[in-house]
């Protein structure tokens, strides 16, 4: 019974440069073949080879840098590959050296967060006649697939039932069928695995720390070490700092750079970050160092380490409490005409660390706005660091009417940056300066009094009258 196989319909041709770097190698191994059918002798043409039972597909490909983490299967990895080779246990198909009969299609792979291949669909083939083409339908072709999900297969002396241009390369076979008697074929189940053969760098510690100091700078050191060296090619990676609760510039100096290991070397490399000292009590602060752009090596279990800047400044007394505001009383003679100004004074209990503002306004008491004084409102303000007393004035109206002293009040409100002190209400007293006021209607009348000379004169008159009375005859 004939067995048909459709190759992946779209992919790019693999770039094959004879001088390409081969820094990272991915190795593939399939499960063992489930079925094997070899050709029936005699085989007069093509690849007359039996496929061994108990075998499977093995192979590898290389890239100048590891595949990116979380790479999707739908994205072709062809542009990243510098060399490859796959074998079915009997023959191998390789991309190097470049040959005109070699074709690549379906070269795709997906990776996890560490850049390990978790899924692949790869098919390579070669024309049996060794020619570049073009080839006609039913031309003989050998093909090998390296799949992780779904079954894979290999065929020798298969019939090509369809060709297409794939990745700019024409005459690529995309449909294979066994040829009676001369085709050898085998299939394996899903479950192929990939192993990344590349050094992996690791931070010596996932977190390092140092006290900040009181002034100047000091250095926090991160150490990165590969788990093994590269035999023939140099390895490198990039690093950079990333702010966290610590701020670049004020707490540490932002930095970036590259670490490089020559072939055969895996010595520890150091990343030095400058910390800035201060005397401000504060919580411990942290930042991270990130590794990226791996060349000749693959990401390790983690690509980040945390740097913690330990506070070494004793806790302070905390912020100073806001000042209190107190308003004083004021007294002023009213005058006999026109207006005069009564001055009120507001004081702060301490020097403010932020701006202080408030509003003031007058209110009637025994004094009446309009006739005795002019109603008024206003605002007082102190800037941070300013503790000088502030004053404001209220106009008092003069008259010649004898009257009792009169009073009004001034109240403070809308305090900002300060709290109420001993008094936030001041009394303004308008002192009478127009003689004794008349008695109030219905009040007690005052008793007249004699002056000193009147007392003397009255005493003399009384003495004279007494003497005359004594001289009168009986």
Image (cartoon, rainbow, N blue to C red):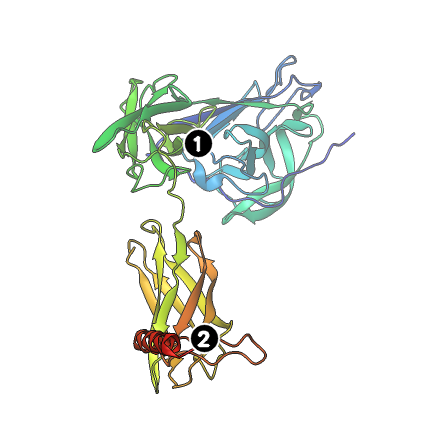
Q: Position of residue 198 (x, y in %)?
A: 42, 23
Based on the displayed image, in which of its 4 quarters is residue 90 positioned? top right
- Count of numbered tags: 2
10 Å crowding of disc 1: few (<14), some (14-19), many (20+): many
Q: Position of residue 453 (x, y in %)?
A: 30, 77
Which numbered tag is attached to residue 404? 2
Q: Which is more N-terminal, label 1 or label 2?
A: 1
Front-most of residues 364 and 222: 364
Q: Relative to 240, is 235 above or below? A: above
Front-most of residues 443 and 200: 443
Which numbered tag is attached to residue 66? 1
Which numbered tag is attached to residue 443? none
Q: Relative to 109, is 227 above or below? A: above
Q: As drawn, is 178 to the left or to the right of 370?
A: right
Residue at the far front in the pictured view:
474
Q: Position of residue 219 (x, y in %)?
A: 25, 28
Dot 2 falls on a residue whose secondary structure is loop
Q: Nearer the viewer, mark 2 or mark 1?
A: 2
Front-most of residues 308 and 331: 331
Based on the displayed image, in which of its 4 quarters is residue 15 positioned? top left
10 Å crowding of disc 2: few (<14), some (14-19), many (20+): some
Dot 1 falls on a residue whose secondary structure is loop
Distance of label 2 from label 1 (alpha carbons): 100 Å
Can see residue 309? yes
- Image quarter (top left, top right, bottom left or bottom right) of the N terminus: top right
Q: As drawn, is 2 to the left or to the right of 413?
A: right
Can see residue 144? no
């Amino acid at each position: 019974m004939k067995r048909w196989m459709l190759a992946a319909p779209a992919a790019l041709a693999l770039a094959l440069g004879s001088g390409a770097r081969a820094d990272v190698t991915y190795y593939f191994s399939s499960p063992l073949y489930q079925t094997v059918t070899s050709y029936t002798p005699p085989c007069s043409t093509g690849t007359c080879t039996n496929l061994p039972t108990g075998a499977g597909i093995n192979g590898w490909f290389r890239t100048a840098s590891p595949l990116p983490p979380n790479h999707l299967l739908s994205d072709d990895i062809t542009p990243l590959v510098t060399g490859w080779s796959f074998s079915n246990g009997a023959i191998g198909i390789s991309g190097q050296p470049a040959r005109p009969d070699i074709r690549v299609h379906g070269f795709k792979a997906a990776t996890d967060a560490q850049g390990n291949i978790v899924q692949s669909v790869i098919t390579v083939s070669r024309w049996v006649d060794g020619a570049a083409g073009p080839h006609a339908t039913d031309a003989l072709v050998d093909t090998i697939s390296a799949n992780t999900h779904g079954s894979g297969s290999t065929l020798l002396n298969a019939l090509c039932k369809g060709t297409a241009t794939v990745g700019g390369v024409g005459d690529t076979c995309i449909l294979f069928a066994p040829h009676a008697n001369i085709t050898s074929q085998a299939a394996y189940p899903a479950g192929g695995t990939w192993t990344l053969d590349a050094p992996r760098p690791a931070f010596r510690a996932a977190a390092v720390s140092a006290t900040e100091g009181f002034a100047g700078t000091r250095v926090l050191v991160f150490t990165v070490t590969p788990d093994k060296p590269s035999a023939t090619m140099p390895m490198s990676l990039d690093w950079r700092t990333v702010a966290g609760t610590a701020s670049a510039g004020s707490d540490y100096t932002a930095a970036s750079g590259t670490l490089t290991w020559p072939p055969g070397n895996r010595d520890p490399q150091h990343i030095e970050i400058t910390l800035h000292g201060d005397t401000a009590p504060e919580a411990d602060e942290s930042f991270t160092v990130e590794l990226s752009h791996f060349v000749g090596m693959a990401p390790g279990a983690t690509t980040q380490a945390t740097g913690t800047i330990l506070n070494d400044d004793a806790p302070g007394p905390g912020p100073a409490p806001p000042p209190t505001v107190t308003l004083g009383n004021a007294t002023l003679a009213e005058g006999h005409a026109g207006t005069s100004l009564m001055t009120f004074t507001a004081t702060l209990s301490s020097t403010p660390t932020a701006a202080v503002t408030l509003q003031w306004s007058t209110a009637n008491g025994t004094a009446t706005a309009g006739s005795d004084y002019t109603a008024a409102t206003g605002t007082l303000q102190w800037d941070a660091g300013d503790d000088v007393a502030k004053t404001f004035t209220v106009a008092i109206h003069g008259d010649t009417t004898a009257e009792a002293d009169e009073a009004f009040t001034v109240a403070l409100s809308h305090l900002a940056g300060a709290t109420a002190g001993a008094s936030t209400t001041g009394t303004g007293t308008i002192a009478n300066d127009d003689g004794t006021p008349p008695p109030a209607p219905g009040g007690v009348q005052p008793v007249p009094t004699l002056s000193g000379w009147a007392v003397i004169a009255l005493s003399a008159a009384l003495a004279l009258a007494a003497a005359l009375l004594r001289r009168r005859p009986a």
